[in-house]
């Protein structure tokens, strides 16, 4: 306990020492042209609110430290160089070093993966050069291309992978979206058309200089850390022979996966192509999009389980199959270790987005038009797998989303500032869902032909915009699962920002969606200091 307190005090002291130094220069002159610099450091601490469970810690769970530095240099009017770097570390692995509970639950074993993000592509966020001759834009380098209009869930926005290993707290754009090496070209011709205010063409090419996939939560505390997905199945080995083998406990958890993944070889395969036409029509923005490339997430089939080194050689000849190895979790429950093989399937889609004001205005609600956002994407030959994870299945897939952003006045709650109310509705459909005779248990993670999700975001501001309470909510209608994310942000000054937030998850259907994080409810505090 003393060691934990000492380390907390040490980190806070370092933050204070750094913050009281003279602020980094906002601008330097290099060759007579401006070099702009910006940086921030943030530290968050996250605590569990659900008590002690095998897949979480009762007290401190996570302590994310982020340090970002970015700079842009414009040697001439039409040329810009931009570089940003981010260091992320979960100091909980330092605070909890030699903690008995942390070690018994095997969180220590995930230290190599989650303590410090030390891959080059994690440290180097963006690095690109932009040339803007006349109506053209050319950008080359490690960058982000954003096509989407929706929040919470991405539809059209599929070019860049995501890093979601660290859960729902401390989620910011620069810490979750992963820039990749791209070539981007745009043309914005001058128009003389009354109804068409703006027209733009964009082409994106990914040469696959370095394949960087999604960084998703995984199973097993020793691999996924505090945000490992907590599956819990009936143990088929538990019943006595001949139904089972009388091994383990009635329930079993899923431990770290043994994965064999085939990635497209750099430069030789896995190239991606994207095109976008944007039109501004009477204040509204319409885009038509097309993409041919790879899915950022792997699709894997289960090929077996880790074998018991003692029982399998003895019993496999009699049973006609290997005997899986069963580990033991900190609470005494059995743990199985599956083996998967997979790759990153082709992703082909076309789609449209639309954003514009609705012709609705109420003086009693503040007199502001609501903004409508829409996305529709049609995927061609999307790959799925059956519930047993043994066979693949392909079907065209439709995913859509519609959202409204409405600023309204509620004088009783806030006489000075608007409330922003942003509901969203998502609808997905597998156009050729397999029959029950083909796949009796349906498809993995998509048991229904049609899928519905709703979200809601509410926020307002007080004290001249310094204090911002917010509530985010998402509900999975098919599975009756939801997540609630309340937060309170306070901007003390241009440099100092503070945030208190929480996350609360539940699900009615076992081993799906938010149910996997049923023991992960938390509260977190974050402090952030910015320079430049």
Image (cartoon, helix red, strand yellow):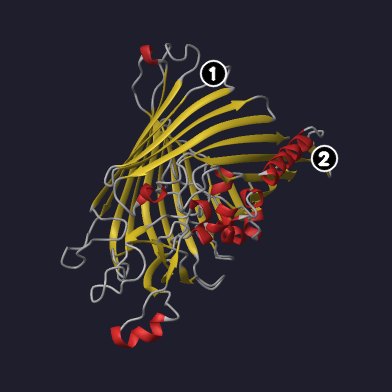
Q: In this view, does 475 lie above or below 442?
A: above
Mark 1 lies on residue: 462
Residue sitting at x 52%, y 21%: 461
Q: Which of 166 and 209 is in front in this view?
A: 166
**Residue located farthest toward the bottom when viewing the structure as drawn:** 317
Residue 277 or residue 486, whichever sits in front: 486
Q: Residue tagged by mark 2?
A: 29
Label 1: how many Cα within 10 Å (few below 14, some 14–19, many 20+): some
| Residue 190 location (% of width, % of height) | 52, 40
Q: Marks 2 and 1: CB-CB under 8 Å?
A: no
| Coordinates of residue 79 in the picture (x, y in percent) | 69, 47
205 w.r.t. 7: above or below:
below
Residue 78 visible here: no
Query: Residue 282 occupies which quadrant of the picture?
Result: top left
Write the residue at 61% across / 58% down.
111
Foreground mark, 2 or 1, reads 1
* Viewer-side residue, 490 vs 210: 490
Earlier-in-chain disc, 2 versus 1: 2
The residue furthest left is: 437
Residue at 32 percent of width and 62 percent of height = 250
Secondary structure under tag 1 reads: loop
Mark 2 nearby-residue class (10 Å; few <14, some 14–19, many ≥20): few
Q: Distance between the residues labelled 2 and 1?
A: 39 Å
Q: Is residue 399 visible?
A: yes
Q: Which residue is drawn at 30% across and 87% down?
A: 318
Residue 330 is marked as none
Tell me where residue 149 sits by quadrant: top left
> Please, is residue 81 above or below residue 197 in the view?
below
- The answer to whether 284 appears left or right of 109 in the picture is left
Where residue 354 appears, as percent x and y from the top left, is 38, 39
Quarter occupied by the C terminus: top right
């Amino acid at each position: 306990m003393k060691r934990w307190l000492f380390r907390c005090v040490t980190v806070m002291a370092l933050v204070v020492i750094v913050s009281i130094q003279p602020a980094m220069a906002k601008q330097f002159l290099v060759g007579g042209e401006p070099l702009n610099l910006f940086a921030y450091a943030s530290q968050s601490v996250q605590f569990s609110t659900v008590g002690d469970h095998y897949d979480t810690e009762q007290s401190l769970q996570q302590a994310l430290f982020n340090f970002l530095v970015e700079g842009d240099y414009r040697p001439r009017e039409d040329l810009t160089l931009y570089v940003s770097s981010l260091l992320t570390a979960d100091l909980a692995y330092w605070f909890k070093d030699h903690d008995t509970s942390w070690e018994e639950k095997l969180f220590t074993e995930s230290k190599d993966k989650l303590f410090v993000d030390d891959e080059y592509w994690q440290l180097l966020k963006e690095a690109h050069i932009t040339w803007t001759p006349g109506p053209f834009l050319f950008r080359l380098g490690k960058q982000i291309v954003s096509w989407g209009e929706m929040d919470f869930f991405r539809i059209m926005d599929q070019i860049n992978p995501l890093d979601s290993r660290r859960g729902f707290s401390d989620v910011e754009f620069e810490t979750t979206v992963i820039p990749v090496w791209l070539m981007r070209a745009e043309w914005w011709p001058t128009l003389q058309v009354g109804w068409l205010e703006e027209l733009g063409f964009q082409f994106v090419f990914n040469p696959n200089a370095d394949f960087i996939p999604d960084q998703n939560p995984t199973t097993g505390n020793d691999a996924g850390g505090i945000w490992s997905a907590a599956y819990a199945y009936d143990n088929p080995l538990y019943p006595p022979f001949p139904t089972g083998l009388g091994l383990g406990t009635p329930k079993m958890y899923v431990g770290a996966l043994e994965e064999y993944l085939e990635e497209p070889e750099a430069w030789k395969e896995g190239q991606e192509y994207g095109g976008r036409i944007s039109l501004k029509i009477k204040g509204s923005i319409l885009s038509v999009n097309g993409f041919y490339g790879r899915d950022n997430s792997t699709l894997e089939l289960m090929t077996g389980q880790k074998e018991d080194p003692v029982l399998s050689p003895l019993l496999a000849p009699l049973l006609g199959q290997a005997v899986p190895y069963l580990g033991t979790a900190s609470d005494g429950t059995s743990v199985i270790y599956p083996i998967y093989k997979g790759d990153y399937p082709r992703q082909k889609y076309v789609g449209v987005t639309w954003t514009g004001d609705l012709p609705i205005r109420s003086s009693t609600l503040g007199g502001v038009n609501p903004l409508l956002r829409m996305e529709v994407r049609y995927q061609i030959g999307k790959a799925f797998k059956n519930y047993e994870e043994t066979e693949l299945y392909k079907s065209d897939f439709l995913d859509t989303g519609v959202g409204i952003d409405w600023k309204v006045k509620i004088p009783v709650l806030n006489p000075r500032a608007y409330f922003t109310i942003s509901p969203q509705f998502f609808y997905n459909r597998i156009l050729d869902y397999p029959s029950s005779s083909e796949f009796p248990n349906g498809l993995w993670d998509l048991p229904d032909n049609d899928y519905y999700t709703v979200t809601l975001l509410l926020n307002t501001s007080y004290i001249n915009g310094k204090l911002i309470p917010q509530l985010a909510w998402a509900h999975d209608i098919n599975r009756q699962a939801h997540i609630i994310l309340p937060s309170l942000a306070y901007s003390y000054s241009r440099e100092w920002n503070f945030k208190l937030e929480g996350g609360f998850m539940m699900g009615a259907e076992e081993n799906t969606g938010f149910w996997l994080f049923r023991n992960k409810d938390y509260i977190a505090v974050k402090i952030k200091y910015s320079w430049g």
